[in-house]
Image: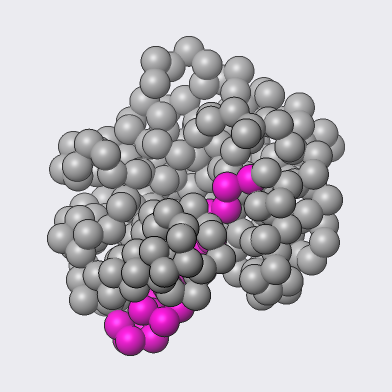
Amino acid sequence: MPPDNPIIVALDLPGREALALASLLRGRVRWVKVGMTLFYAEGPVVVSELKNLGFEVFLDLKLNDIPHQVAGAAAAIARLGVGMFTVHASGGVAMMRSAVDSASRAAEEVGLAPPAVLAVTVLTSTDDEGLNQIGIEATAADQVVRLARLAEEAGADGVVCSPAEAARISSIVDSKALIVTPGVRPTWAEAGDQARISTPLVALEAGATHLVIGRPITAAADPATAIDRILSEIERIDR
């Protein structure tokens, strides 16, 4: 089993490029993220292939539909053997609860541990102005907190939020809740299209349990060295 460090490498690459990169990272990280780009290109088989390489898979499809549809999707996802997957908290308590219950039942039926259901709060590419454009007058920070409380009510295992809100979230959710933070950029990386970002060390100190990091690793000339640089940035924290 690869080391249980907090990095989740976002394999947001098309087709087989992602699997080639994952092969290079074996032994350095435990978790990889499969998002829409990779899943829609390769389908469910990519999860099996990554698991065969020894990784835990975080399937980030951000389910958001009526509870019946989300329940069906969650069951299918659970049968793939992923470790975590996402739903949109904005879908509401009933929808999130349907995902939690359905995933748990489906995993039990096939003899697997139930995956953690994570509720996506406000995307890290969205700021206060972006929320206002769609009729939400709350700040991004306040909206994250509101949605995190709904996720906890629905029985979700954790939330996805930016590092900027991790401290507030860690103070209001159960101590066992997962706090997964995209929008994490090492000190030497560009922000890209993320609006609410932080460094790995600051995110962990704020309460993040996992750090989703993509392009600083996947676009690096030497991805393995990039991971080692990130780990050296966070080794000072007592986790």
> Residue 180: image x %, image y %?
41, 46
Front one among 81 and 70: 81
| Quarter of the rendering containing residue 179 | top left
Where 102 sits versus 127, above or below?
Answer: below
Q: Is residue 57 left or right of residue 143?
A: right
Question: Is residue 200 one of those drawn in magenta?
Answer: no
> Residue 208: image x %, image y %?
38, 36
> Residue 7: image x %, image y %?
55, 36
Q: Residue at x 42, y 64 (%)?
A: 107
Where 181 sits versus 137, above or below?
Answer: above
Residue 7 visible at all: yes
Q: Is residue 51 left or right of residue 23?
A: left
Quadrant including the N terminus: top right
Residue 115 visible at all: no
Magenta extent: 55-74
| Quarter of the rendering containing residue 16 | bottom right
Q: Residue at x 22, y 59 (%)?
A: 155
Question: Is residue 63 one of those drawn in magenta?
Answer: yes
Task: Count every numbered label the image shows and give the total.
Answer: 0
Front one among 210 and 202: 210
Q: Is residue 75 left or right of residue 178?
A: right
Quadrant including the C terminus: top left
Q: Residue at x 53, y 30 (%)?
A: 4
Q: Residue at x 68, y 74 (%)?
A: 43
